[in-house]
Image (cartoon, grey):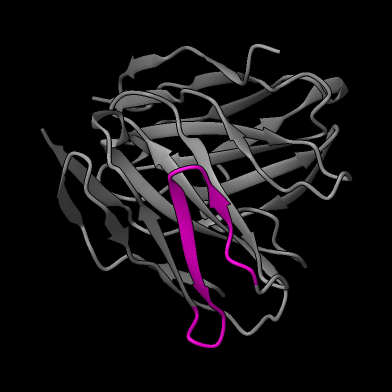
Amino acid sequence: AQTVTQSQPEMSVQEAETVTLSCTYDTSESDYYLFWYKQPPSRQMILVIRQEAYKQQNATENRFSVNFQKAAKSFSLKISDSQLGDAAMYFCAYRSLKGADGLTFGKGTHLIIQP
Amino acid sequence: DTGVSQDPRHKITKRGQNVTFRCDPISEHNRLYWYRQTLGQGPEFLTYFQNEAQLEKSRLLSDRFSAERPKGSFSTLEIQRTEQGDSAMYLCASSHEGRGIYEQYFGPGTRLTVT
């Protein structure tokens, strides 16, 4: 079974600064998807960015980018120019491409933006 | 396209009662997922449907839980003889497989409190 570990329960960053959230995962599969989801307080979870394991190029979406290190099974999220609206719980998630179809989530990182 | 909706948003029930939640996926999404999220944790996969067929159930889904998706549209999740340990946020997500896109779109969740 796959596991996803987020070792930072909480992170704090000054507005306009850059912050990196860590995620590691354990799998024996070679092909899979990885995601970062954002869950604002009392609001629904939204997708921030995704990465296909077969792609070597790191995904980027505006101020959000990932550092995908397949051999190290690491998938960190970098948020540049942090904004107050980025404050939320961030979850790293793994999706197998065979068998189990549900996402496996980490425990999340609570991101605080200091004005 | 109004996104994934869930009803009710909050439910308080007494131990031993039955409860039913509803999820309406994004129209034309052929896959529908149920997750459970307890405080301080990431969502945990419960089950999913491809159209009307329930294809996978997690071992977390005890025999007190049942899910249906008649006609491949909305889905219901019923919990019989609720226990205090069932208190959690129940999340629904949908996706459209087949386009090579594997993002799951989440609803706002139903928060269940068992007293």
Which span of residues is magenta-colored? A57-73
Instruction: Describe residue B109's horizontal placement relative to residue B22 as left or right.
Output: left
Residue A28 at x, y = what percent? 63, 85
Q: Can you see residue A19?
A: yes
Q: Residue at x 64, y 45 (%)?
A: B47
Q: Is residue A9 above or below residue B33?
A: below
In this orientation, which residue lies closer to the viewer: A52 or B40?
A52
Q: Is residue A32 above or below residue A16?
A: below
Inspect the magenta stretch and tell me whether residue A62 lies in it. yes
Q: How many tags in the picture?
A: 0
Residue A52 at x, y = what percent? 68, 63
Residue B94 at x, y = what percent? 68, 33
Q: Residue at x 21, y 48 (%)?
A: A17
Would you identify the image quadrant in which residue B1 lies? top right
Q: Residue at x 30, y 60 (%)?
A: A20
Instruction: Describe residue A63's horizontal placement relative to residue A100 as left or right.
Output: left
Instruction: Describe residue B34's horizontal placement relative to residue B11 as left or right.
Output: right
Q: Is residue B68 above or below residue B21?
A: below
Inspect the magenta stretch and tell me whether residue A37 lies in it. no
In this orientation, which residue lies closer to the viewer: B11 or B79?
B11
